[in-house]
Amino acid sequence: MSLSIKKEYDVVVVGAGPGGSVAARFAAESGASVLFLERDRETGIPVRCAEGVSSPGLDQFIDIDERWIANEIYSARFITPDGNTLDMKSHVKGYILERRIFDTALCDLASQKGATMLTRANVTHAKRTPDGLVEVAYTHVGTPKTVKCKIIIGADGIESRVGRWFGIKTNLSLTDVSSAIQYTINNIEIDPHRLEFHFGTNIAPGGYLWIFPKSANTANIGIGITGNFASEKPAKAYLDEFISKRFENPSINYTVFAGIPVARTLSEIVTDNVMLVGDAARQVNPITGGGIKQAMIAGRLAGKLASEAVKTGNYSTKFLSKYPSEWDKVLGSKHSFIHAMKERVIYASDERLNKISRACAHIPPEKMTTLELFKQVVKGDPKLVLDMSKAFLADKFTT
C-alpha cells in the first residue's frame, strides 16, 4: 500500500523535530491540511542534544510515558574553575529523554490530529508562485516531487535553508554559535539523578561542559564553546582531556557533533507565506543552549496561527507577525535578557566565576536558585539588574 500525497496542502512543515511536529499537530488540530517532511529515515536520529528537559516543559504538550524517559533528575551541581561546587535542588522534576522515542511520540500525536508525515523526504528548494502560494521541491526516497502550500513552516534547524530561500537573514556571529560535541559514555560511576556543569577557561572557554546521567553508569557528556574560542582549540580536545582525567575506563558508544545557536531570536522570523520555528528562528536559551521546550512553545504558536491564516486567506507578513509578537510575550524578550547575561558569563575571568561561587557558597542546595546565581553575575550593572528584575517579576523566565 502506498501513501497518497496530495498536490496541495494548507501548510507544509519542513523538519519533524519537536518544533516541527508540534507545529504540524496544532495546525492540523485547528483544521488545516498539513504535510510535514523529515529528511532522515526516522525522527530523533541523530541525537543532537543532551536530552534534558523539565516536567513543566513537557506536561503541556504530551502525557509522560516511561518509554521515552531514560532517567529522572532532582538536582544540579555547578563546578567553577577553582574546583568549588554549588549544589542546587530542583523544585520541579527533570527528565533525561530518549529522543528517538520521544520525537516519534510527538510525530504520532501530529498524525493522530490529521497531519501527514513523510520521512526520507529531503526538501531541496521552495519558492513563491504567481498565484500567491509556495511550491516546495523535495525528493522522497530519491524521487523528485513537488507540493504546493499556502504556508511553509521552517523547522529545519540551525542551517535553515527555508529562511534563506525567502530572504530571511539567518547569519550568526562566532560568539552566537556554540561548537558542540557530545559522547554517550558507559562504564562510569556517577550520581544518576544529578546534572553537572563545569566552567572555566581550561575546561570550556566561552561555554560549559555538562554531564547528563542516563543511569548510574551511563551519561551524555558534552561540551559547547563559542566559535571564537573553538578556532584556537577544538571542543573535542577539551572534552577528551576532561574525560581522560575524570574517568578510568570509559566506553564511548555514541558521538555527535553539532552547532548550537546561542543568540537572540532572529529579528525576522516571518515573511509572506513563511514562518520559522526552533533553532531555525534561534529560539534557544542563549546560556544553556536548551531548546526542546522553546521549540515546542514556538511550534504551538506558529501552528495555531498558520491555521488561522488559512481560514482568513491572509498569509501576509503583517498577519503572520502575530506569531513573533506572541513569542516575545512568552519567551522572546526573556531570551534577550539571557543573551545579555551570556555576554557577561562567557567573557568572565576564572577569578570572576570563582568569586560568584564563593558569594553563593553559604546558600543551602534547597534554597539555591538561578535567580541567586544571576544576582551575582549582574552585580554592579544597574541596567542588567533592572532587566533581570523585570524578567523574574513577569514569572515567565525559563532555563
Image: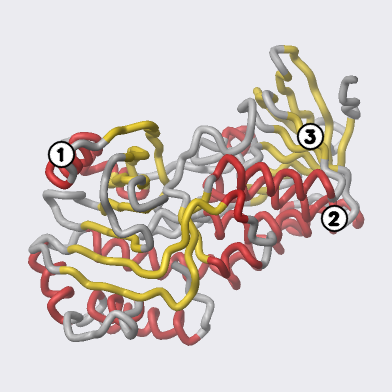
- The kind of residue on which mark 2 rests is Glu
Q: Would you name the residue on which mark 2 appears? A: 29
Gap in angstroms between the C-alphas marked 1 and 3: 52 Å
| Of 63 and 204, the residue lying toward us | 63
Query: Within the image, what quadrant is residue 273 found in?
Result: top right
| Of 275 and 42, the residue lying toward us | 42
- Say whether residue 266 is visible: no
Q: Earlier in the sequence, mark 2 or mark 1?
A: 2
Q: Would you name the residue on which mark 1 appears? A: 244
| Of 98 and 154, the residue lying toward us | 98
Do the CB atoms of the residues marked 2 and 1 lie less than 8 Å apart? no
- Say whether residue 107 is visible: yes
- The kind of residue on which mark 3 rests is Val
Image quadrant where one finds the N terminus: top right
Q: Residues within 10 Å of mark 2 (few under 14, many from 20)?
A: many
- The kind of residue on which mark 1 rests is Ser
Task: State the image coordinates of residue 368 (x, y, percent, origin top left).
Answer: 31, 81
Query: Within the image, what quadrant is residue 84 found in?
Result: bottom left
Q: Is residue 357 left or right of residue 154?
A: left
Q: Would you name the residue on which mark 3 appears? A: 134
Q: Residues within 10 Å of mark 3 (few under 14, many from 20)?
A: many
How was the colour assigned to the protein in this rendering? Answer: secondary structure
Secondary element under disc 3, as helix, strand or loop, is strand
Secondary element under disc 2, as helix, strand or loop, is helix
